[in-house]
Image (cartoon, grey):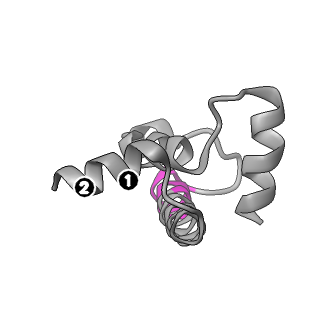
Amino acid sequence: QVSDLVRLGSQIDAGMTTEAAMISLASTTLRPQACGFSLSEEPDAVFGLVTALQQSLLRAFDKLARKQPVSTLGELVRRIR
């Protein structure tokens, strides 16, 4: 569960939040050339798997974020808009 990842991660790093995880995942640039580490899969296949995992995690974190209450800063931004 991604909620467990956030809970456990925040015990190590107080900056670990659902939003921080989403920003980190979304801003990570993945390159096929960096996926040559597998002993059994071709780099393009590994790239596909890593990209699919990234997208799956982003969807899961987004779903979790939508269930959480809006932060004070988020409420301020909503009012300004």
Q: Quadrant of residue 8?
A: top right
Assign the magenta stretch its main secondary structure.
helix
Mark 2: give few (<14), some (14-19) or many (20+) Cα within 10 Å: few
Query: Is residue 31 visible in this depiction of the protein?
Result: no
**Amino acid, disc 2:** Arg
Mark 1 vs mark 2, CA separation in Å: 6 Å
Q: Which residues are magenta?
A: 42-50
Q: Is residue 67 above or below residue 19?
A: below
Q: Is residue 25 left or right of residue 79?
A: right
**Amino acid, disc 1:** Glu
Q: Quadrant of the N terminus?
A: bottom right
Residue 42 position in % (x across, y down): 54, 55
Residue denoted by label 1 = 75
Check if mark 1's residue and mark 2's residue have beta carbons within 8 Å. Answer: yes
- Indicate the secondary structure of the residue bearing disc 2: helix
Residue 71 position in % (x across, y down): 50, 49
Q: Which mark is residue 65?
A: none
Q: Quadrant of the C terminus?
A: bottom left
Identity of the residue drawn at 47% across and 59% down: 51
Residue denoted by label 2 = 79
